[in-house]
Image (tube, rainbow, N blue to C red):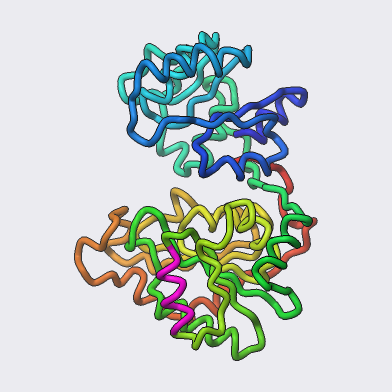
Amino acid sequence: MLSRLKALHPGLLIDVIAPPWVIPVYRRMVEVNRVLTNPFGHGELRLFARRRFGKTVVRNGNYDQAYVLPNSLKSALITWFADITVITGFRGEARTWLLTDCRILDKRALPTMSERFASLAEPAGNPPHRPVATPRVSTDDENRADVMRRLGLDHHQPIIALCPGAEYGPAKRWPPTHFAAYANQQIAAGNQVWILGSKADRTIGEQINQLCNYTCKNLCGETALADAIDLLSLASIVVTNDSGLMHIACAVGAPVVALYGSSSPDFTPPLSRKARIVSLKIECSPCFQRVCPLGHFKCMTDITPAMIGGAIPTVESSADVAQAGGA
């Protein structure tokens, strides 16, 4: 969406209101002028605080138009309190009266989340420009060098990055034993293995590393999000669940193998020509549940490390990869 807005209006200044955890991503996007911290946690109404935030912080930006991506009433209130003339978003949660440019979502015409957001950049009634732009985030060479020194990393051997976490729940996660089996194969082939994730993924990373006789680098919880962006850009292959780090790995141009079980690549696919999807598409998948409702978890446990080897992306030259930004 941001990329398309810039293409339609090259001189446009775009500010983003975002929760603290995702701010590092927006700061690495060339389309973004400034990032404002959203002080409200998920599910918090805090009506008077929202009113104050909209009427002071947001209104001071003198914005001509606002795009409200979450479908909640709460998210639209901020821009409404800021008296922004044009407020664009999809109809949802009884907020039609808050949106001056209210769009009705046609899920069949716009099956993926990226297409839905991209369509908001177009005038009402127009389909999204296709192909939808490949999201891009920039890297910081100086920060990457600092992080590698701090963590004792090098890139003299090819780097295999594993991203075993998934915030939504265990039904989206390939088992640690499978990650470890794949990692052992790569280490035996002369590659090094980095495990990346948040502090919440530290235990999973440790399980994988233990099964590899501690020959991996478990970096879960050791890096800020900006650091992970820079480190993923060095990877020869990133093997990842359907997660935020999957999309970041694609956005830095790394070759990606994306594993899908309870979620669907038809809705949130990896947006990169260098990405390959591994999904068994068994009868009960995708269920979009946090935990396997049937108890067998075959959609992920039946994906073998050998299947990952067969899905290794062909590394294309940078000229073959769409360079347009956005997300």
Quadrant containing the C terminus is top right
Residue 206 on the magenta span: yes
Tell which residue pokes out farthest to the bottom in this image: 188
Which quadrant of the figure has residue 300?
bottom left
Image coordinates for residue 244, horizontal then vertical, percent: 50, 53
169 left or right of 211 in image: left
Residue lying at the far left in this picture: please name it: 294
Instruction: Characterize the magenta stretch by its predominant secondary structure.
Output: helix
The total number of labels drawn is 0
187 to the left or right of 261: right
- Give above or below for 263 relative to 235: above
> In the image, is residue 149 above or below residue 114?
below
Q: Residue at x 43, y 32 (%)?
A: 70
Camera-nearest residue between 16 and 226: 226
Vertical order, 194 against 260 (above or below): below
Counting from the top left corner in percent of width and height, residue 226 is at 63, 51
The location of residue 105, given as percent across then percent down, is 42, 29
Q: Which residues are magenta?
A: 201-210
